[in-house]
Amino acid sequence: MKITFAIAAAVLAMGTAVAAPVKYNIDPNHTYPSLETDHFGGLSVWRGKFNKSSGSVVLDTAAGSGTVDVKVDTSSLDMGHDKLNDHVKSDAAMLDVAKYPDATYTGKLTKFVGGKPTEVDGTLTLHGVTKPVTLKLKQIGAGKGMKGEQRVGYVATTTVKRTDFGMRCHCCDAMRFGMRQSDGVPEVMKSVREQMRQGADHIKIMMSGGVASPYDPLDSLQFSPDEVAAAVQEAKAFGRYVCAHAYSPEAMQRAAHGGVRVIEHGNLIDDKTARLMAEKGMFMVANLVAYYAMRERAAEYGMTSDQLAKNDLVIGGGLKSLEICKRAGVEVGYGTDLLGALQVEESREFILRSEVLSPIEIIRQATTIGAKIVRQEGKIGTLKAGAYADLIVIDGDPLKNLGLFQEQGKHLSAIMKGGKFHKNRLN
Ligand SMILES: [Zn+2]
């Protein structure tokens, strides 16, 4: 979630006076600001250089002061890989160079050691956002050039948080800010509070093992009753709620007794647990399509045989879990949980559920029940005055044919979000 910039600048003096302030121009042929940024929460590092930059440094050694002005042409970024260059330059959540062609830094030389500047206090404007940024300076050489001009070389470095500049790489945000490992009641309380401060609408705790996590058995219990209660207490105190990732009845029951509001996945639920959930007014969010899509295609994306074996265990419970919840009166939301390249299958969940539920039941799960779960009843999942104007117009009757939701919107004549058409072939 950070970017480290390094500017190795060969600056060329225009004046030759020694006592008075000297203006150095940044030498564009020897100055290539470089950057390094983590990807996938540190799983890999991206590196690159900007090939065009300009600016000047004014230095008054006697007075111990000076200024720095640098402009970097963001479209000149080269990360050594064409696809990556295109992605980082064009993505609105990254550099977006069409909109923000320059990154600028302006500052004052603030610290001097032995007559040499060591720090700049200033502001960086990047991706249209201006924030205070301090640069560390290190002199790497000095001398006379071919024409007798004075040359000084400096390396300037800084590390900034990408999100401070509105650059929201989605994978990294989720990995770095969305997850925390917490052991014991105080750590759970602290983590929940931190998530709330960062704007979380709800907390999801891992109550049992997962399919995609490599070592935890599905039926392992991962938070003690006290830890669950602590998470719920803190979320409630903030006006939020807690969801629990859970596959086994034991994990779901522990969650229910601790005050959790929503069970995620829930494939291996039994009647007794469903009745307990109904009694407590809990919801479940099922996501069958992820397991089918993983069985068919996840091996090609690197899922191991252990993970796929766990997947087979939960796939059997999927449709049954919907029937059990219906019998007990537990409302179920429409989830998908599709990872990465499998996301194109989101609408297939309608078809899978239709083996045990009617079309209107499934459509309600995707609209009104979903709205209840995220506490936006009356605002989303409904067409009425005062609600957000989100709607789709379908070519045909989905109550007779859920296939109309398939094929990536082929059967949708109009798609409106927040009152704005994103697709409209009605006229
Ligand atoms: Zn989960």
Image (cartoon, rainbow, N blue to C red):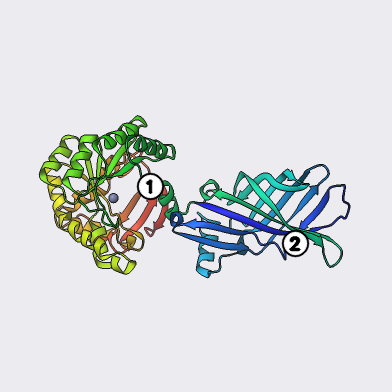
Residue 210's x, y, as percent? 26, 53
The residue under the point 10% across, 44% down is: 271
Q: Which residue is mark 2?
A: 27
Residue 189 image label: none
In the image, residue 119 above or below residue 100? above
Q: Among all residues in the image, which is located at the extreme front? A: 114
Q: Which residue is mark 1?
A: 179
Q: Earlier in the sequence, mark 1 or mark 2?
A: 2
Q: Amino acid at mark 1?
A: Met
Residue density around tag 1, few if under 14, some if 14–19, many if 20 or more, within 10 Å = some
- The quarter of the image holding the C terminus is bottom left
Judge left or right: residue 126 versus residue 281.
right
In the image, residue 229 above or below residue 310? above
Residue 164's x, y, as percent? 54, 46
The residue under the point 74% across, 45% down is: 113
Which of 5 and 345 lies nearest the eye of the viewer?
A: 5
The CA distance from mark 1 to mark 2 is: 44 Å
Residue 200's x, y, as percent? 39, 41
Residue 97 in sight: no
